[in-house]
Amino acid sequence: MYGSERATPDLLALWTLFRETRQVFHSYWIRGGELRPEEVQFLATMTLSHIDDIDVGYRWTLRTDEVPRGELSGVLRPEDVTDWSSEPRTDPTPVSPDLGKVMALRHAEVVFGSLPRTPKGEISYPGYASYADIKVPRTPVELRERIDELAVGVWDAATHRSKTSLDMERSRRVYGFFETGTWLANTHLQRIQRN
């Protein structure tokens, strides 16, 4: 089946990214906030690049009619808005979205939605046996906040921020995101392998 063959390399790449990121976060907690240079490099290049893809996918797919007018400023950043009043009127050249970035966003939405249902046996976050209390983002504003939270959480680890100075709930949500993403990708890879 072409669909399975096509999905496998992409799914394997996602699984690798999420697994490695989760392992780096686990090491971060075990070592009291310390990371080896190659772990920092991985977070700064691979993981943050993927989060940037999620962010770009979000901006590509956002429909402003889905957002209450009063919340637009919480969803859009100044660089997302073009002031056409100062530009000469020309027909803009259409730009096709990068579907890889849209897929990164859609995958992130699945992970966010699955986080509270992650099986207890898959959870390794210190001191917790469940992510059931973590809310699924339901609005564009909540999704924007969670995407931003991923970037901040990864940056905190990459810059060796001490565990005692972290927002522990944010750290748990970020860790859980990568743990749940690993579990989901692994589950689907096993299904593909059996077929």
Image: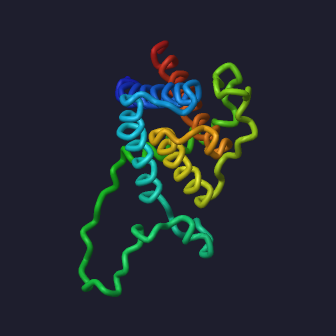
Instruction: Classify residue 181 by image quadrant.
Output: top right
**Residue at 44% across, 45% down:** 51
**Residue at 73% across, 26% down:** 129
Residue 147 locus on image (x, y percent):
53, 50
Residue 79 locus on image (x, y percent):
39, 68
Q: How many marks?
A: 0
Q: Is residue 3 visible?
A: no
Of residue 20 and residue 5, the one placed in the foreground of this image is 20
Residue 137 locus on image (x, y percent):
64, 50
In the figure, is residue 98 to the left or right of 48? Answer: left
Q: Quadrant of the N terminus?
A: top left
**Residue at 45% across, 53% down:** 55
**Residue at 61% across, 44% down:** 166
Of residue 110 and residue 143, the one placed in the foreground of this image is 143
Q: Is residue 68 visible?
A: yes
Above or below, 112 against 21 in this view is below
In the figure, is residue 127 to the left or right of 107? Answer: right
Instruction: Classify residue 69 by image quadrant.
Output: bottom right
Residue 187 locus on image (x, y percent):
55, 22
